[in-house]
Structures are given as C-alpha cells and as structure tokens.
Amino acid sequence: MAIRLGNNCQNCKNLNGENTCKVHGVEVSGHYTCDQFEMRAELKDHRDCTTCLRYEREDCANPSHAAPGMMCASWAPQRASA
C-alpha cells in the first residue's frame, strides 16, 4: 500500500487556523478538495519521541531513553489509525 498526501483541504495553503477556506469562506475538513487547491509549500516533518503515539505509554520500545529530541526505529505518528 502506498501512502500519499491527498489533494484535500488539510494540505492546501488556503486553509486557515480555524479550518476555514480563505478562498470560499466556508468551514472545511480533509474530506474536501476543489479546483483552487494549492499544495502547502512546507510540510512538517518533526519526528521525535514527543510526536510518537507510544511516548510515555507502556508499549514504548525504549521507555528509559524516550525524551524530547530522541528518535527510534519504533516511532509511530500520533494520529495513526489502521
């Protein structure tokens, strides 16, 4: 299974902080897209223990070493769902 960024409002530079489209002036979500879609120039790639789903949980692979700024091979995104 390939993982790709969607051409949806969550990845559009016209989305403001309140989940409102700057072009259309309506509330949107990741389920929407339109012809004025413009990909954000920057995507956040901040991966360390603080952004890991397992941080400070029992299933953390390295609980004695887990700390802000650290990274391991068991990192999982906080919003993971399968």
Image: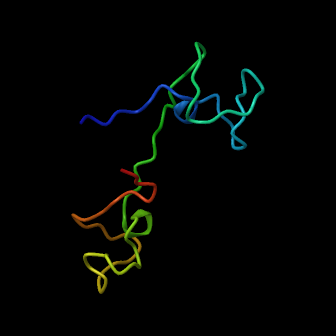
- Relative placement, left or right, of 5 versus 62 is right
Q: Quadrant of the N terminus?
A: top left
Q: Residue at x 45, y 47 (%)?
A: 44
Residue 21 in the image: x percent, y percent? 70, 29
Q: Residue furthest front?
A: 82
Query: Residue at position x 58%, y 12% from top?
Result: 35
- Tell me the residue at 39%/64% (across/down): 52
Q: Report x, y in % for residue 73.
A: 21, 64
Q: Residue at x 25, y 75 (%)?
A: 61
Q: Position of residue 16 (x, y in %)?
A: 69, 37
Left or right: 21, with 62 as reference point: right
**23, above or below 53, in the image:** above
**Where is residue 58 drawn, in percent x and y?**
35, 81
Residue at the extreme bottom: 64
Give the total number of marks visible in the rendering. Answer: 0
Identity of the residue furthest to the top in this view: 35
Which image quadrant is residue 64 in? bottom left
Q: Nearer the viewer, residue 46 or 60?
A: 60
Nearer to the camera, 61 or 14: 61
Does residue 38 appear to the left or right of 75 in the view shown? right
Identify the coloring: rainbow
Q: Quadrant of residue 19?
A: top right
